[in-house]
Image (cartoon, rainbow, N blue to C red):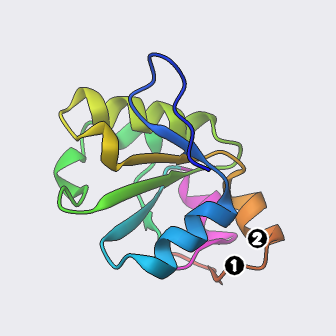
């Protein structure tokens, strides 16, 4: 179940919750905030790559009309990306950090793509 820690402007979820959200809501976007080499080695299918250190510079690329699921390797960079998105004005109710990251996504056998394309 989605959890929000005191002071955090986003919700924490696991990959199983993320998969359920994606299956039930077409207005969700996965944002992978890892580096290109990590992304190319395997990422959640249809995830958009915006490395965490480019979130502010590429803020306009975030779909503001969708719920955003941020994912990285271990939940740290994606948490920072959620913080940045909130600081730029995206509603906290639309920000989710997938805590078990891409390794959790892959371990659960959810759809994965390889290479540079979503």
Q: Is residue 44 magenta?
A: yes
Element carrying mark 1: loop
To which residue does mark 2 refer? 106
In magenta, the rendered stretch is: 34-45
Viewer-nearest residue: 65 or 57: 65
Q: Is residue 68 magenta?
A: no
Distance from disc 2 to disc 1, alpha carbons, whole Å, reads 6 Å
Going 45% across and 41% down the picture, which residue do you hit? 52
| Residue 111 visible within the image | yes
Residue 40 placement: quadrant: bottom right
How far across and how far down the image is residue 67, in percent? 33, 58
Left of 34 or right of it: where is 64?
left
The reply to whether discs 2 and 1 touch (Cβ–Cβ < 8 Å) is yes
Element carrying mark 2: helix
- Residue most toward the right? 107
| Residue 118 visible within the image | no
Residue 91 placement: quadrant: top left
Q: Report crowding for label 1: few under 14, some 14 to 19, many 20 or more residues within 10 A (C-alpha).
A: some
How far across and how far down the image is residue 82, in percent? 41, 37
9 w.r.t. 94: above or below:
above
Instruction: Residue 110: give its label.
Output: 1
């Amino acid at each position: 179940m989605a959890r929000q820690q005191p002071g955090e402007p986003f919700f924490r979820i696991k990959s199983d919750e993320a998969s359920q959200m994606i299956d039930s809501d077409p207005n969700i976007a996965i944002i992978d905030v890892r580096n290109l080499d990590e992304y190319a080695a395997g990422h959640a299918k249809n995830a958009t790559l915006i490395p965490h250190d480019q979130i502010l510079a590429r803020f306009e690329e975030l779909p503001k009309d969708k719920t955003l699921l941020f994912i990285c390797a271990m939940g740290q960079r994606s948490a920072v990306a959620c913080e940045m998105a909130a600081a730029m004005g995206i509603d906290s109710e639309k920000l989710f950090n997938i805590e078990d990251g891409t390794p959790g996504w892959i371990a659960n056998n959810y759809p994965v793509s390889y290479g540079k394309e979503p």
